[in-house]
Amino acid sequence: KDTTQKISGPAYLQNDNVEYQYMIVVDNGKGDLNKFKIGISDYNSMMFASQGLSINSLILDNLHTCIIIKPFENKKQALDYYNLLKSKPDLFGYLNPGTFQVVIISTENFPLFYKDKNVDTYKSFFDQNILKK
C-alpha cells in the first residue's frame, strides 16, 4: 500500500513580466460576495479608472469561490495593488475574517491552479516565490 502523499502541486512558473491577476479565494457562504465586489469595483473606479480593471467570480469547487481582478501588466503592478488593498481592511468588511485567502497569480499559472484546485499549495508557492523579498 502506497502511503506517500503528494505534497507538491503543479510546477508553477516564475515569470515577472507576464499578465497577473489579483485573486481572493473565499469560503462559500462566508460573507456577501456581491457587496464585496461592489465595494472593490467602486474603489477601483476611484483609484484605477484608467487601468480598466474587471472583477469576475468563478466557482473553484464546492467549498470555494474565486474573485478575480485583472488585468495587471506584470508582477510588480499586481503586487503594488495587493499591498495597497492589504492596507485597506475596510474593503474586506463584507467577508468573514479568516475565511478567505488573497494572492496574485500570473495568467500562465492560473490554469495550473484551477486544474489543481489546491489553495494551500498555491498560497505556499505565492508566499515563498512572490512575496519573499
Image (cartoon, grey):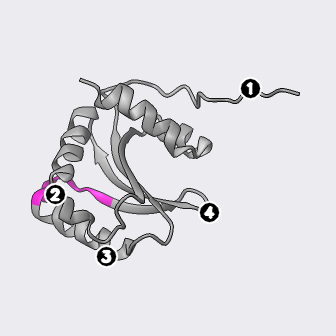
Q: Which of marks 3 and 2 is nearer the N terminus?
A: 3
Label drawn at residue 46: none
Q: Mark 3 points at which residue?
A: 35
Look at discs 1 and 4 and give the one toward the viewer: 1
Most foreground residue, 117 or 100 = 100
Amino acid type, label 1: Thr
Is the residue under label 4 in contact with that under label 3 (CB below 8 Å)?
no
3 or 4: tag closer to the N-terminus = 3
Q: In which quarter of the view is residue 73 placed?
A: top left
Q: What stretch is highlighted in magenta?
A: 47-54
Residue 62 disc label: 4
Residue at image coords 57%, 61%:
63
Q: Which mark is residue 4?
A: 1
Residue at 42 percent across and 60 percent down: it is 99
Residue 6 left/right relative to 105? right
Disc assigned to residue 88? 2
Residue 48 belongs to magenta span: yes
